[in-house]
Amino acid sequence: MNLPWAEPYRIKTIEQIHRTTPAQREDWIRRANYNMFNLRSEQVYIDLLTDSGTGAMSSAQWAEIMLGDESYAGASSYYKLKAVIEELLGFPFFLPCHQGRAAENVLFTTLIGTGDAGAGKVVPGNSHFDTTKGHIEFRKAHAIDCTIDEAFNTEIEHPFKGNVDLGKLEAVFKAHPRQDIPVCMLTITCNSSGGQPVSMENIRGVSALCRRYGIPLFFDSARFAENAYFIRLREPEFAQSTIPAIVKEMFSYADGMTMSSKKDGIVNIGGFVAFRDEALWRAASTFNIMFEGFNTYGGMAGRDMGALSVGLREACELDYLESRVGQVAYLGGLLTGHGIAVQRPYGGHAIFVDAKRVLPGVPKEEFIAQTLGIELYREAGIRSVEIGTLLADRDPDTGKERYPALELLRLAIPRRTYTNAHMDYIAAAMANVKDRAPKIRHGYRIVREAPIMRHFTVELAPAE
Ligand SMILES: *Cc1c(COP(=O)(O)O)cnc(C)c1O
């Protein structure tokens, strides 16, 4: 018999969590204005809001916390991180930031500017993450999504739904003068379209196209290790390659990268922006000093840089990635078994439930995926997050709702945190919601919303 995957770690410390009653949850979600970001963590039993900063650190990482060097300049923890970024990712220059969006702020300030400097400019890419799009639109530039069409049909089993449609990308390059395309952003893996990877073949294609048109290529790399694992799994050329070798090759095609270390860095906070070009790094370091901190700590404590230097390497261990992606697929298999439509193939960090198929009776104006998330919370105290109309936000020019092709409910799985028994519980709860779906005919309406990235703070009320 083939041995199955199993976690390459055992549990040394546990954190207690508690179940709650339906009456409690009803009261709490109403007080939270039906926005799951407003729930207190004690009101949640299993927290699938995000895999960001919610993973469990290893004993080796906790040891680095104690070794943290908190010197303002030249800390040894900084040099530990610098060595790993250079060896593992291949970038000679980097700036630590407090998290991924801070890295985006530094990068886009450098490449686009501030205020309305982005007016008339475009940043093509694949399913830009919400903070990335936020930073682009905040500068009055436009994010153009060139993801392949297959990504928007949850039933198509395409192995690399994060891929860029090179035809769409070239059309953007042809339609805009070079100076209006400050950068092309490639997101690995695509969070917003289901944790879907980008193939090495596609990375090579995007890189060649960017080079031909003289456009810098940066990777939004929050889940780079999971992307590398999918390349190994699904691209025959790499079946025998090591994860570090795949990682190194992936990044060799990029001019730089932004990183949210809260994902594949397996730390609770942190990020960085890395460059191949020294002049660009110099230009960016001015903004890093202004927004984040001096170049050798940026937005991070020394101890956190130390833990990150270990986490980046641990995230690239094959046994870890097998159990990580295996657990996500385990949940996907259970849900599929219950007849619940989820994005196929299963993504790296989360299962994305196709909410329109689970709740066909809820009109799109009433936030279908958000409605499903609230029902899952009511059912079992499980917190998830909407990747649908609330997140898509209004069109910045017209103020009209932008209804995305997919209404997804993301069940993000924190790294090394929950067991498969938790996965069983989640799947059973979702099956119960599906059983009563025919009675769910109404969703929610907006009571209050912010002008940008409204999903974090939006206040809702039942629509009827
Ligand atoms: C989380 C994330 C970001 C932003 O990072 P933060 O650390 O949350 O600021 C950017 N891009 C992607 C793909 C992400 O998943």
Image (cartoon, rainbow, N blue to C red):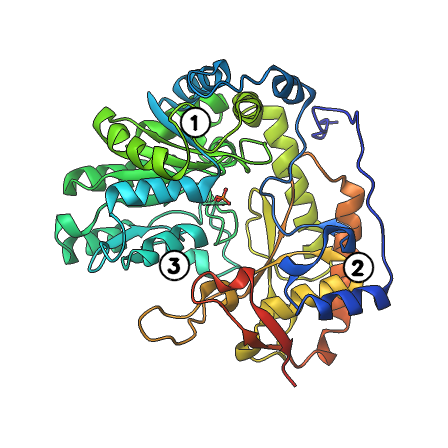
State whether residue 129 appears in this view. Answer: no
Instruction: Categorize mark 2 by other alpha carbons within 10 Å: few (<14), some (14-19), many (20+).
Output: many
In the rendered image, the quadrant that contains the N terminus is: top right
**Amino acid type of the residue that numbered disc 3 sits on in the rendered structure:** Asp
**Amino acid type of the residue that numbered disc 2 sits on in the rendered structure:** Ala
- Pick the front one: 54 or 434: 54
First in sequence: mark 1 vs mark 2: 1
Name the secondary structure under disc 1: helix
Q: Is residue 70 left or right of residue 41?
A: left
| Residue matched to label 2 | 380
First in sequence: mark 1 vs mark 3: 3
State whether residue 85 appears in this view. Answer: yes
Q: Is residue 277 left or right of residue 237?
A: left
Q: Which mark is residue 149?
A: 3
CB contact under 8 Å: marks 1 and 2: no
Examine the rendered structure and indicate whether residue 117 appears above or below residue 261: below
- Pick the front one: 293 or 235: 293
The residue located at (71%, 28%) in the rendering is 7
In the rendered image, the quadrant that contains the C terminus is: bottom right
As measured in the structure, the alpha-carbon distance from the residue carrying label 1 to the one carrying label 2 is: 38 Å
Name the secondary structure under disc 2: helix
| Residue matched to label 1 | 247
Place of residue 103 in the rendered image (x, y in percent of width and height, measured from the top left): 40, 39
Instruction: Categorize mark 1 by other alpha carbons within 10 Å: few (<14), some (14-19), many (20+).
Output: many
Name the secondary structure under disc 3: helix
Place of residue 11 in the rendered image (x, y in percent of width and height, measured from the top left): 78, 27
Examine the rendered structure and indicate whether residue 322 appears above or below residue 195: above
